[in-house]
Amino acid sequence: MDKIRNFIIRGERNSGKSFLIKKIISCYNHKVKTAGFFTEKDNSGTVTFTVWDNFCLINNGPQMIIYDLNDKIIRENVFEELGVWALNRALEHGSLLVMDELGRFEKDCRNFTRAVLRAFSSDLPIIAAMKKEENPFLCSILERKDMLLLEIDPCNRTEVFNEINLNMKKLFPLD
């Protein structure tokens, strides 16, 4: 069987998806050119999209607000512009693509969803977090045969980490 190169970590809110991705990429930080994006929600309900990599010093890179609880508007242009740029940049310059996270906000963003699906069809390994919900965009990713889907919850984080790390070592052997 071929090496697994795409990993989807799926779970409920606060299950540890982002924490696990950051833990995995920290293990390979000096060996692998990681690029992609993180989305984070603060205590006020604001969700921010941040471009991230570990090779051009943009760990605090371009970022834009996707959603603000005060106005309840999903800013699809963030995905269509900054998101597509981040994915294309990762495909061009990275060795590992990180997408944290995929969910409902971007389901109607045609350019972004096409860019995500194009990334999954590339040779670049992917580690992605996904909300535990269903929509056509997420289902199209889950139907793929070239990825390992790992359901995470607060009780199995260590097991999920070990499973991904075992497969990552096959892709990126640590000397």
Image (cartoon, grey):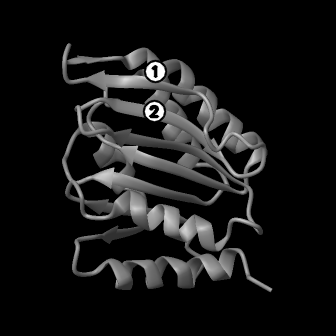
Residue designated by label 2: 49
Q: Secondary structure at mark 2?
A: strand
Please provide percent x and percent y for residue 20: 43, 67
x and y percentages locating residue 41 in the rendered image: 31, 39
Label 1, secondary structure: give it. helix
Q: Which residue is mark 1?
A: 78
Between 28 and 8, the residue placed more toward the observer is 28
Tell me the residue at 22%/80% (across/down).
155
Is 92 above or below relative to 174? above
Give the numbered dot on residue 70. Answer: none
Dot placed on the residue nearer the N-terminal end, 1 or 2: 2
Q: Residues within 10 Å of mark 2 (few under 14, many from 20)?
A: many
Residue nearest the viewer, comparing 115 with 11: 11
Quadrant in which the N terminus is drawn = bottom right
Q: Amino acid at mark 2?
A: Phe
Q: Position of residue 116 (x, y in %)?
A: 50, 39
> What residue sits 68% from the left and 75% below the top?
171
How many marks are shown on the rendered structure?
2
